[in-house]
């Protein structure tokens, strides 16, 4: 299973509210005061990220 790292806390919280499962969290390697939120990578996750960030979604 592929995983998707989310570095922005507010985006991660919005994705959780939308029903996406949080796989785990980990410390950011570059700055340990920040957390990285890890989600299972799905097409729906990509669509929701695009919608929340104001970008268009293009299926690969």
Image (cartoon, rainbow, N blue to C red):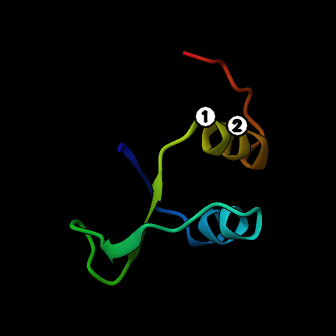
Q: At x 29% / y 70%, what residue is drawn?
A: 28
Residue 23, quarter of picture? bottom left
**The label number, if any, that marks residue 14 in the structure image:** none
Direction front: furthest residue? 1
The answer to the question of whether label 1 and label 2 lie on touching residues, with beta carbons closer than 8 A, is: yes
In the image, 48 versus 27, the foreground residue is 48
> Percent x, y for residue 52?
76, 49
Q: Is residue 23 left or right of residue 28?
A: right
* Element at label 1: helix
Q: At x 60% / y 34%, what residue is drawn?
A: 43
* Element at label 2: helix
Direction left: furthest residue? 29
Q: Is residue 12 above or below residue 46?
A: below
Direction bottom: furthest residue? 33
> Percent x, y for residue 14?
72, 66
Q: Nearer the viewer, mark 1 or mark 2?
A: 1
Q: At x 57% / y 72%, what residue is drawn?
A: 9
Residue position marked by numbered label 1 in the rendering = 43
Q: Is residue 47 left or right of residue 3?
A: right
Q: 10 Å neighbourhood of mark 1: few (<14), some, or many (≥20)?
A: few
Query: Where the C terminus falls, by quadrant?
Result: top right
Q: Is residue 45 left or right of residue 54?
A: left
Q: Is residue 43 above or below residue 23?
A: above
Q: Is residue 2 left or right of residue 44?
A: left
In the image, 43 versus 8, the foreground residue is 43
Residue 38, quarter of picture? bottom left
* Distance Cα–Cα, label 1 vs label 2: 6 Å
In the image, 30 versus 18, the foreground residue is 18
Query: Where the N terminus falls, by quadrant?
Result: top left
Q: 10 Å neighbourhood of mark 2: few (<14), some, or many (≥20)?
A: some
Residue position marked by numbered label 2 in the rendering = 47
> Percent x, y for residue 30?
23, 66
């Amino acid at each position: 299973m592929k995983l998707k790292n989310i570095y922005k806390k507010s985006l991660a919280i919005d994705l959780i509210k939308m029903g996406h499962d949080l796989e785990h969290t980990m410390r950011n390697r570059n700055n340990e005061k920040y957390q990285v939120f890890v989600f299972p990578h799905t097409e729906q996750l990509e669509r929701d990220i695009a919608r929340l960030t104001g970008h268009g979604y293009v299926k690969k």
